[in-house]
Image (cartoon, rainbow, N blue to C red):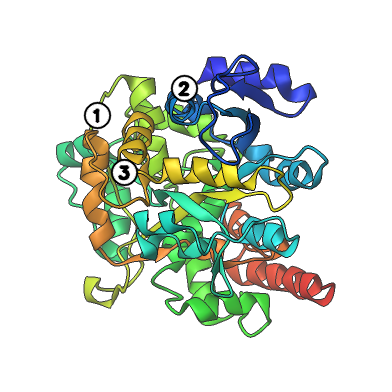
Amino acid sequence: MKKLMKTLAVFSAVGSLLVTGCGGSGASSNANGGNGKEVTLTFLHWRGEDVPTFKKIISEFHKKYPNINVQMQVLPSNQYIAQAQANLTGNHGADIFTSFPGSEFSAINKAGLYEDLSSQPFLSNFNSDLIKSGQKDGKQFAIPYQVVFNMPVYNKDLFKKLNIEPPTDWNGFLKACQTLKDHGYTPIVFAGKVSAGQFYNDIVMNNVTDPNVFTGLLTGKSKLTDPDFLKSFEQMGELAQKGYFQTGALGTSQDAATAIFAEGKAGMLALGSYQITPVNKDNNNGFKMGLLAPITTASATDAKYQGVDTTTFMLGVNAKSPHKKEAEEFLQFLSQPDIAAQYANETSQMVTVKDVKYTVPALQEMEPLLKKPLRFQPMYTLTNQQVVDDVTNVVEDVISGKDPKVAAKKGQDAINQALSLK
């Protein structure tokens, strides 16, 4: 991964890394895909760590459709939202691309850059409940490929050593944190702004249970100063005041937070399931991990949800592409259960495709979570990026020590201003 990031940096002058997946100008002229002519598709995404697996998959695709070449273009994930739309609107934009749900999906859809995929037969290969985040007005514009659990990763071996049972209510969560702290461990490793946005999802899931109330922030019907939102900020502040985050939590990068957790000196990592593989790589599978969402209610029976999930890495076809037919052939290929299983097990990512057999232990352990009451990541239901930023800023202010009521009012004032500018 470090080697890859260095490579990405080298390519930063042009903003992306171009990766040839297969074939090229010397590919066979035995055309059997699309309109039969030899074409090269550009596949734009942010998953640099998935490049080796995608190269294999693209090679298999090329064997089936020798006239279709696929070239990956990889942008760093922290630059993707800013650069992807500019790429797609250019004269030589990507033919196939990925997007995040929420504000990015909304912006790209408003720009008319998604080809309508509603009539594609391969949609039946997906779990229909898991691809809704790519729908708008009854049409399927993007297809989420990954299922991510946005819940803190916890050190199962450490919890067992300290006789900590996974807590089922707020007092239990505080007690677990205190036990970790009393034994010299950091209860929760926080990864700056990334954790500020993600951890808030877990805190708010059982405090603001009505999704329409949460998205009411976009219309002014709900306010950050309302009691249930305020309770969430107060609970975040309580964790900070009691010293349950590491020193310098807001200045810690995602990689640094992962490295700290991998050392085995912390109980939880405030990121998500996608970070299990990097931790295992950092510490050579040094300890067992699980996923643990903080339950913020007074009793377990009051909790409506047991965790947060997100369907993301949403595959779309550029409406401006001259090779839409060939691009749809590639999406159809990715939707096949055996191909999706190859992607899932090699990258340790759960997928939205049905009938996939997971062979990686970490994925096998996560699979039962899909049967639990989970909430789609609330922050991704906010389609205005400025509102997302304002909520995240309140979380950061509270962790910095600002009074939750003062921070919430400041955040609401910023949202009011953003909405008045629409």
Quarter of the rendering occupied by the C terminus: bottom right
Q: Secondary structure at mark 3?
A: helix
Q: Which mark is residue 136?
A: none
Amino acid under disc 3: Pro
CA gap, disc 1 and disc 3: 31 Å
Residue at the spot x=28%, y=58% of the render? Answer: 370
Q: Quadrant of residue 192?
A: top right
Q: Position of residue 30 (x, y in %)?
A: 53, 25
One can see residue 415 in this view:
yes
Residue 203, picture quadrant = bottom left
Nearest to the observer: residue 219 or residue 293: 219
* Residue position marked by numbered label 1 in the rendering: 287
Residue situated in front as seen by the camera: 84 or 222: 84
- Quickly name the residue at label 3: 337
In the image: residue 197, left or right of residue 266: right
**Residue 392 falls left or right of residue 422:** left
Mark 2 or 3: in front is: 3
Identify the image quadrant of residue 288.
top left
Can you give x and y, in whole percent of width and height, for residue 1 in the image? 50, 21
Q: Which residue is mark 2?
A: 52
What's the residue type where badge 1 is placed?
Phe
Q: Closer to the N terminus: mark 1 or mark 3? A: 1
Q: Residues within 10 Å of mark 1 (few under 14, many from 20)?
A: some
**Taking 245 as reference, is 263 left or right?**
left
Q: Nearer the viewer, mark 1 or mark 3?
A: 3
Residue 10 lies, in percent from the top left, at: 71, 16
Q: Amino acid at mark 2?
A: Pro
Tell whether label 3 touches label 2 (CB within 8 Å).
no
Decide which of tag 2 and tag 1 comes sooner along the chain.
2
Residue 402 visible in the current orientation: no
Q: Residue furthest bottom?
A: 221
